Image (cartoon, rainbow, N blue to C red):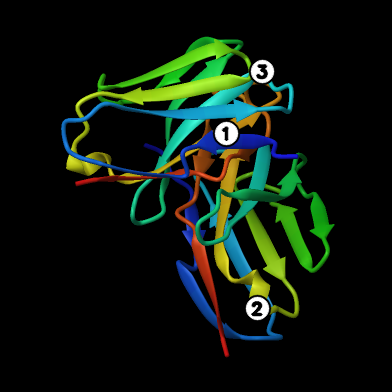
Amino acid sequence: GQQLNQSPQSMFIQEGEDVSMNCTSSSIFNTWLWYKQDPGEGPVLLIALYKAGELTSNGRLTAQFGITRKDSFLNISASIPSDVGIYFCAGLMDSNYQLIWGAGTKLIIKP
Amino acid sequence: DTAVSQTPKYLVTQMGNDKSIKCEQNLGHDTMYWYKQDSKKFLKIMFSYNNKELIINETVPNRFSPKSPDKAHLNLHINSLELGDSAVYFCASSRSLGKTQYFGPGTRLLVL
């Protein structure tokens, strides 16, 4: 099935560093969503973006809906240990009712 | 209060058995979903129900049969379990089709 291009696949960072990840697609989306999955849990919605160019923050997290509507990025500032997990992007099109998912970015914080 | 709940959280069973996973949401949503997450963590949609009606049925073996007794529940029955069915199964719900989805904690199925 269709899948978004999410990068990087994994990140090893020091506590306190900023993190950036992104998703791209050849298709246009009307909604971009960013989820985080902790080990042993289900994905939890972090940020939802509904408008091209929209920049939305949730605490130390900031996400943007690309102007072309084909991409989105998520930034995490001053990472802390509880930020570890897998971050997924997902996009929704009006033409169908399915969420198209990225493969995830695994965030690991070095002690 | 738990928004989307699933039972059981863990399920270990023998090949060939039949098992069910239950999902309930108390969000008042109209749409519910089942996803399968493989060992590489990729999330794959299996089924989508809107107002108890099947909307999406991806290429899933017919051994998998979803049942929605009401809008708040979507159960997944699996017949003749195979080794390849081992995965984490997530239930999700959304206010309506095409809206933001909220996930349950997952059911970890291991087929021996």
Q: Position of residue A4 (x, y in %)?
A: 48, 48
Q: Which mark is residue B4?
A: none
Q: Amino acid at mark 2?
A: Pro
User: For mark 2, what is the residue?
Assistant: A81
Q: How many marks?
A: 3
Q: What residue do we see at 71% from left, 27% from top?
A: B26
Position in image of residue A87 (x %, y %) = 57, 59
User: Alpha carbon of mark 2 to alpha carbon of mark 3: how far?
Assistant: 36 Å
Residue in front for this viewpoint, A27 or A88: A88
Q: Does residue A93 appear anywhere in the picture? A: no
**Quadrant (top left, top right, bottom left, bottom right) of the N terminus of chain A:** top left
The residue lying at 65 percent from left, 46 percent from top is A33
What residue lies at 52% left-to-right and 21% top-to-bottom?
Answer: B74
Furthest toward the left, the residue is B16
Q: Are marks 2 and 1 in contact (CB under 8 Å)?
A: no
User: Please, what secondary structure does the residue beneath circle 1 have?
Assistant: strand
What chain does badge 3 belong to?
A: B
Task: Report x, y in % for residue B73.
Answer: 57, 20
Disc nearer the start of the sequence (1/3): 3
In the picture of the structure, the residue carrying the numbered disc 3 is: B30
Q: Is residue A104 above or below residue B105?
A: below
